[in-house]
Amino acid sequence: MARAYDVTGIEKKWQQRWADEGTYEVEADDPRPPWYVLTMYPYPSGPAHMGHVRNYTFGDLLVRHRTMLGHAVLSPFGFDSFGLPAENAAIKTGTHPRVFTDARIAELKESIVSLGAVYDWRREIRSHDPEYIRANQVIFLRLLAHDLAYRANAPVNWCPGCQTVLANEQVLADGTCERSGDPVVKRDLEQWFFRITRYADELLADLEALDWPERVKTMQRNWIGRSEGAEYDLTVAGRDGSDGRPPLVLRVFTTRPDTSFGMTYAVVAPEHPMVDDLTTPEHRAAVDELRARAAASSDIERMSESGAGGLGKRGAFTGSSVVNPFTGLPVPVYVADYVLMGYGTGAIMAVPAEDTRDWEFAQAHGLPFVRTVRPPDGWDEHGGPEGGPGGAYTGPGEKINSAWLDGLDIPTAKERATEWLESEGIGERKVNYRLRDWLVSRQRFWGCPIPVVYCADHGIVPVPEDQLPVLAPDDVAFLPTGESPLATHEGFRTTTCPVCGGPATRETDTMDTFVDSSWYFLRFTDPHNKTEPFDPATALHWMPVDQYIGGIEHAILHLLYARFYTKALADVGLGPAGLREPFARLFTQGMIRMDGTKMSKSKGNLVAPSTYLSTVGADALRLFHLFVGPPADDVDWTAQTDSVIEGCGRYLDRVWRFAVPEDGAAPPRHDGTLTPEDLAVRKATHRLIDRVTRDYERWSYNTAVAACMEFVNLLQPYARGDAHAAVVDEAVDSLLLVLAPMTPHLAAEAWERRHGDHVHLHAWPVADPALVAEDTVTMVIQVNGKVRDRLDVDPAIGEDAAAAAALASPAVVAALAGAEPRRVVSRPPRLVNVVV
RNA sequence: GCCCGGGUGGCGGAAUGGCAGACGCGAUGGACUCAAAAUCCAUUGUCCGAAAGGGCGUGCGGGUUCGAGUCCCGCCCCGGGCACCA
C-alpha cells in the first residue's frame, strides 16, 4: 500500500539512533527508581516469528512507557542458545552447532531490532558463551556442595536400536524411537538430579504473594501436588518375626487413612523391591511376566491399556497376604502396574469402595469391597457411574463398618485413624508431593558440560573452580548414532583426578537447557562478572523482575525451575540473601493460531513478520498486535488479518499527515480566545491522556488504541476548519506522546520534526482533571426499563431534580399514557427509571 | 474423568449492575478522477414501517433486581491444562 511517509527509512533511522545513542542503556547507580522488564529468554531458531513480535511488542511498550514515567528501566536481551535443533542440524549438515547457532542468533537479533524493540545490548548473554558456561558450572558445583545436586539411579527411556538414552520428546506417541523406530524401554541409569523437592513447600506457599495469573499459579500448585495423609506398615502374614525369620513389613501411603477398615487387598508396584520376597513359587511365573511387561512398556502403553478409561488394570496375585492392622484380618497382596514406584512408598492399601482405581481393579480381579462411608440413598442401585449400580463413592458422608470410627465425618475420622497409627507405633502422618527431583542429565553434546570427573579411588570429584569452564571439544564428528559425541571422544573423556592425579573419566552428560534459563535474569544484572555468576548486591538492586512477559507454555517447567534456582542460589550463598522469588509480576500473552492450531515452525504455518516490515512497517504491525484484542487472548490469523494490519497502517498515515502536514496543506489557524469548539477539543485531548494512561495500567492496549483512533476521528474535521493553533498543537503533541510506546518510530520522527528533540525522553503526559471532568452528562430516562428519552444534565444534578426532569419529559409523559408512576428510581446523573 | 478459560453483528472485539455492539475490518452508496489507486463523506444487529417510530436481540432454561452481557442456580457447546500421584 502507498504510504504517507517513508516508513522503512524512518524506522531504520530511529533503530540506529536508539542504538547509537544508548537511549535504553542503564547502570545500577542510576538515580531514577529501578524497574526491570523482561521477556522470556528465546531459543534462537532464526528470524522472529509472529509470536515473538507479539511478545516483544508488549515488552517494548512497557520499557518505553516506564522510561517516560521516570524509571531507570533494565531491558536486557539474550539467547537460550543450547538445545537439540542445533545438534540435529549438525548431524544433518555437518555444521558445528556453534556456527549454526550463531547464525540463527544473528537472524533473530536483526529481526528483533527491526521491530523497533529496544534493549541494553551491552548486557546480551548467550547460554553457549564460555563465560556463561563457567558460571553455570560454578553454580552446579555449589549446589553439589550443598547436597542440592546428587547422582542417582533412575529409569530413563532407552532405545535398544540406538544403544542410547532418549529425551522424552524423542519418544514418539506410540512408544517408539523417532530415529530407529524401535520400541523404547525403561532402563535404569546413573543420572544427575537437583533436589527441587526440598523446596516443595516453599514453592507452594510463596505462590500466594505473587502477582501472577491465577491460571499459572493453579497449574504450579497441581504440579507440586501436595497431599496430606499417613504412611503405615502392613505386616506380611506369617512373617511377624515370631518364627525367627526377620519380620517382613510393607509400608503404604494413603490420603484416606479413615478408609482403612475397607481395605480388601494391597498392591505393590512392579518395580517394588519387595516383590521377590512377597511372591510365592506358584505365582512366580505370572508375577515375572507382569514385571517384564511393565518394564517393556512405554508410559503411554501403560496408560492406554491399564490407565484411566483404559482396558482394565493389569495385575497378578503374589501369593502373600498382609494383615490389616485395623481389623487384624489378612488381605491378599497384588502386583499391579497402576501403582507407581515413584510416588509415596510404591505400595498401597486398596479400598475399592472409596477409590475409583481400586474399584476398577477389584472388579477385574473378582475382589470384594466393604463400604466405610455411607453413600447416598440408592447408590448401589443407580447412583454409580453413568447412573448404573454401585462404584466407588468418594464423596462426603458418615463413617460405617469402621468400628471406633463409625458415625464420624471423614475429616475427623482421618485424624482419629492417624492418631491411632501413631499411638500404636505402626505409622505416622505424612505429606507427599507429586513433584519429583529435577533430572538434569542429558546425553547431548550441545549443552553445558556437567563439571565432575569420576576417579576409581575418589569417586565423584568436582572439577576445581580454577579449572572451569569445562568446555566440549570442537574436534568431534556428528554422526547419526543418537549418541552424544562427547561420550566417545577419548581426549575429552579421559582425564586425571584432581585429588590424586590418577586416571579418571569425565562426566560426558550435559545439563538440561532449562538450567540455563533458570538464572539468566540474574546474570543480566551483572553480565560481565568474571569472578562470580553475578554480584548479589547488584542483582538485588534490580531484582525481582518487575514485569516478566512470556508464553503460557512455560507456566510450569521454566517458571518453577527459575523459582527453585532463585531460592537455592540464595541458600548456597551465590544469590542475594533475601531474594526468594524471581518474578514479581507475570504476564502470559496469548498465542497466535492459524486454522485452529498454534502457529509454529513445526506445524509449517508460520507467517513471516518480515513481509509486513517491508510493506506496512514495524509500527503498523505492532499497532495491530496491540489492537487486535486483549493481550492475554489468543489471536486467530485469518484471511482478514492483512486488512486489519493495513487498517493500522492507514491510521498511522492519518496521524502522520496531521502531525507533519506538507507545506501549504494545513489550513490557517487562529490564535484568539477559545471558542466552545476549541475547548471541546482540549477536553478531548485530556480525556485521551486519561484513558490511555488508565488503559496502559490495566493492560488494555486494544482500548487504548481505540481511544487514539477515536481521537483522530474527532480531531480531523476540527483541524480542517478554522482551528485554534495552540489547541491543535496540544492535541497532536499529546497524541504523539501517548503513541510513543506503541508506535515508537512514527512518534519519534514526527516529534523530532515538530520539536527537534526525542519524544521518548519526554515525561509521560498528565491529564488536567478539570478538563477530564464532563460538564454535561447524557442522562437516560427509562420507563419500565426501556429508554424513552435522553437529557443533557449537569453531572452534579440531584436525585429529586433528576426525577423531576425525567417526569417532565414529553416522551415519558407519552409513554406513561396517563398512568401513575409507582416508583421512580433516580440514579443521577446517569439514569432515571420510571416504573409503573 | 478433574481443574481452569470462553460463547456478544458478516469478522476481531467494546461495555465500575444503568443508552448493548465503542474502535477497527469487511460490505454498500456517494464525492474526487478520463479511469483506477489513494483520500474524504454517509450507511451498516435484526424484524415491521414510506417515514416518524416501534418490536426483538449478548449459547439455552430458570432466578435475584426498578434494571442483568455483567450477579446466582441448572444445562449445552468450544478452547486449554492435568490425567492411574493412592
Image (cartoon, coloured by chain):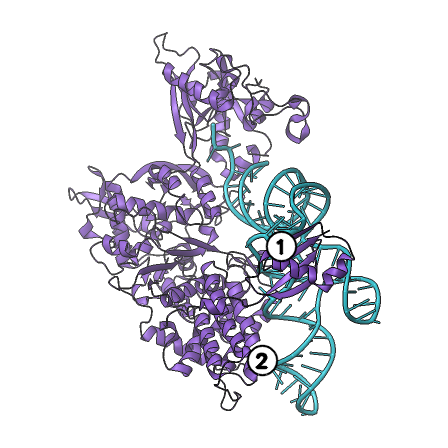
Chain colours: A purple, B cyan
Frontmost residue, B73 versus A47: B73
Left or right of A385 in this view: A582? left
Closer-to-camera residue (A411/A323): A411
User: How far, Cα to Cα, is label 1 from label 2?
Assistant: 37 Å
Residue at the image position 52 percent from the left and 23 percent from the top: A316
Query: In this orientation, does residue A264 appear?
Result: no
Q: Residue at x 47, y 74 (%)?
A: A735
Instruction: Give the SS element for disc 1.
Output: strand
Residue A252, position as x, y percentages in the image: 43, 23
Q: Nearer the viewer, residue A420 or A728?
A: A728
Q: Nearer the viewer, mark 1 or mark 2?
A: 1
Q: Chain of mark 1?
A: A
The answer to whether A86 is drawn above or below residue A242 in the figure is: below
Q: Which residue does the image show at 68% across and 22% down from the upper left?
A: A381
Instruction: Read off the chain for label 2.
Output: A
Q: Disc 2 marks which amino acid?
A: Pro
Instruction: Using the image, determine if residue A475 lies above or below residue A142.
Output: below
**Mark number for residue A826?**
1
Residue A763: x and y in percent read 37, 70
Using the image as rendered, state which of residue A12 and residue A785 is in the foreground.
Answer: A785
Residue ID at (55%, 14%): A401
* Residues under numbered marks 1 and 2 in contact, where contact means CB atoms less than 8 Å apart: no
Residue A316, numbered label = none
Write down the residue under mark 2.
A717
Side of A148 relative to A798 (left or right): left
Which of the two labelled residues, at mark 1 and mark 2, occupies the earlier sequence position?
2
